[in-house]
Amino acid sequence: MIERRFEQIIFASRWLLAPFYLGLVISLGALLVKFMQEILHIVPHVLEMSEKDVLLAVLTLIDMSFAGNLLLMVIFAGYENFVSKIDVANHEDRPDWMGKVDFGGLKLKLIASIVAISGIHLLKAFMNLAQTSRDELMWLVIIHMTFVISGVLLACMDRLEGHHAPAAKSGPKSATDQH
């Protein structure tokens, strides 16, 4: 009886994570505010801006969009994997991947998003080479390559783990399993 109660308490403790995900939702709202602020800075001056400056501004918006996508993935997958299932199964706008991304898949999606964000920062630095010091550029390349190598190693470890999994993974793979 004591063991059962103890296990119930441990199982219920997953709800302590719920405020973390609510905080991430608030962070997504804050990111939206900054995105809109950036749009409001760009639009009135777009006709005066050089093509390079417009492209840099667009890359900043893409960067923010990737960060928002990353937040949303963490919110959905983290909440569903660690707290509770989100009951929107019949909703027409429910993303196909929702409820199918396990912790390993989430890690791979996270590192892929981080690599993409890092790549955008690196591209912005290359496009703005006149204002970027050699040291800053070197560190951006080193950091980006660290993320790329980390992503490749993480994918390799995940792949190796998949080969040692029980027979549940046997059978023909769908197109989404192969990517």
Image (cartoon, helix red, strand yellow):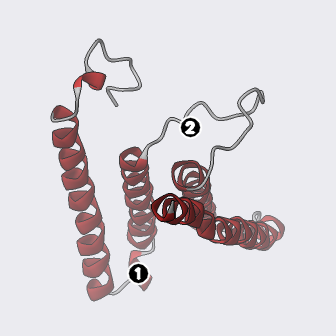
Q: Nearer the viewer, residue 125 or 173?
A: 173
Task: Check disc 1 and give the amino acid type.
Answer: Ala
Residue at the spot x=77%, y=63% of the render?
A: 47
- SS class, disc 2: loop
Task: Check disc 2 and give the amino acid type.
Answer: Gly
Residue 158 in the figure: left or right of residue 36: left
Mark 2 or mark 1: name the one nearer the start of the chain: 2
Above or below: residue 86 compared with residue 61: above
Asked whether the residues under the numbered discs 2 and 1 touch, taking CB atoms below 8 Å apart as contact, a structural biologist would say: no
- In percent of width and height, residue 120 lies at 45, 62
- In percent of width and height, residue 14 lies at 56, 62
Q: Nearer the viewer, residue 33 or 38?
A: 33
Residue 124 in the figure: left or right of residue 61: left
Quadrant position of residue 172:
top left
Residue corresponding to mark 2: 99
- In percent of width and height, residue 85 lies at 63, 44
Residue at the spot x=24%, y=53% of the render?
A: 154
How many marks overall?
2
Q: Nearer the viewer, residue 114 or 52?
A: 114
Residue corresponding to mark 1: 130
- In percent of width and height, residue 17 lies at 59, 67
Of marks 2 and 1, the one in the foreground: 2
Q: Nearer the viewer, residue 137 or 144?
A: 144
Above or below: residue 143 compared with residue 15: below
Q: Quadrant of the C terminus?
A: top left
Q: Outermost residue toward the top?
A: 172
Q: Residues within 10 Å of mark 2 (few under 14, many from 20)?
A: some
From mark 2 to mark 1, how far is it between C-alphas? 46 Å
Which label is found at residue 82? none
